[in-house]
Image (cartoon, rainbow, N blue to C red):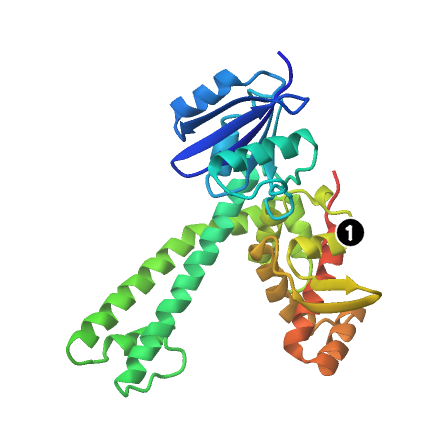
Amino acid sequence: MERAYIGIDLHKAFFQGCAVSPTGEREWEERWPTTDEGIAGLLARCGPESRLAVEASGPTWAFVDRLVSHVGAVHVVDARKTRLKAGYAAKTDRLDARRLADALRRDSVVGIYYPPPAIRDLRELCRYRTHLSRLQAGLKQRIQALLLRHGVRAPRGLFTQRGRRWLASVQLPGWAAAELHGLERLLDDMRQQLVPVMRAIRALAASDPIARTLDQHPGFGPVFSVTLRAEIGTIARFPDGPHLASYAGLVPRVARSGGRQWTGHITKAGSPWLRWVLVEASVHQFRRPDRFGRWARRLAMKIGRLRARVAVARALCEEVVTTWPRA
C-alpha cells in the first residue's frame, strides 16, 4: 500500500481525519467518535506505512498509544510552532485535518516529545504531589483568614501538634464554627493523602540513578530531583543548557528588526512544572559557598533578588545538562 499522510484534528468526543497522497492529492476524509470503534475505523483506513500527525491536546497521549504500533509513524504536533493556516481563510475541523496532513507531507510539522508510559506515570505522581501541597496551603490560608475575620489571634506554629490542640479549643459563632471544623477535616485528609505520595517520591529518589545524581545539587532534595527527572524525561533532547532553559520558558522574548534588538519578559513557554522546580531551587543557590553562589549573590545585589532568581534558574539548566548521567 502506498504511503499516506494523515492529519487528525482531535477533540474530546470525536476526531476528524484527512489523508493525502505523496503527491498531495486528497484520498479520503472522515469523522469518527473518539471510541474504540472510531479508532478501529481509522486503522482500517491506514496502512503499515501511513504517517499520522495529531495536534497535541488533552486526550492526545491515550489516543496515540492506541495507534502507534499499527502505523508507520505518529507525530504529535506543536500547533504553535507548526504553520498550518497558510492558504485557508476559514478554520474548521475538516480544514484543520487537511492542514495537518499537508504539513506532514511537506515535512513542515514540528513534533513534541512523546514520553513513554513510565515517564508519564512519574509525571502524574509529581504533579499529584504538587496539587495536594497547593490545596493544603490554600486550606491553611483559609483557616487563618477565618480566625482573622472573627478577631481571633492565632499563635505561632498554628499547624503544629500544639497549634492544632489550641485550634480545637477555639469557639466561633454560628456557621463559622462549622466552617472551621470542616476545613480542619479537609486539611487532615490532604495530609493523609500526601503520606504515601511522599513515600513513593523518596523511594524513587533513592533508587533512580538520575534522580540520585540530581539530588546532589544544593537545594534540590527528593521532590525537586524526581520532578526534574519526570519533566525532562531524556536529556538527549537538549544539547545544552540554553535549550533546556527555552523548554522551561526561562529565556527572554527577543525581537530584532533593522539591526536593533529588544528583549522582554521570559516566554513562559514549555513545561510550567519544570520552570517551577528550577525557580524554587534557585532560592537555595544564593547560600552556596562556591563560585556559582558568589555570582548569584552579586547578581541579586545588582538587579534584585526576584529577578536574580530567574537568571539563577536559567543558569541551573546548564548544571543539570552537564551533570545528567549518560547511558
* Circle 1 Cα neighbour tier, 10 Å, few/some/many (<14 / 14–19 / ≥20): some
| Frontmost residue, 140 versus 170 | 140
Amino acid type at circle 1 is Asp
Residue 28's place in the image compared with 275, above or below, is above
Residue drawn at (46%, 55%) of the image: 129
| Frontmost residue, 161 versus 112 | 112
Image x and y of residue 239, in percent: 77, 47
Image x and y of residue 212, in percent: 65, 50
Query: Quick check: 145 left or right of 82?
Result: left
Image quadrant of residue 143? bottom left
Residue drawn at (48%, 22%) of the image: 42
| Frontmost residue, 153 versus 302 | 302
Image x and y of residue 37, in percent: 39, 22
Q: Is residue 68 visible?
A: no
Residue 223's place in the image compared with 38, above or below, is below
* Residue assigned mark 1: 240
Q: Quadrant of the N terminus?
A: top right
Residue at disc 1, secondary structure = loop
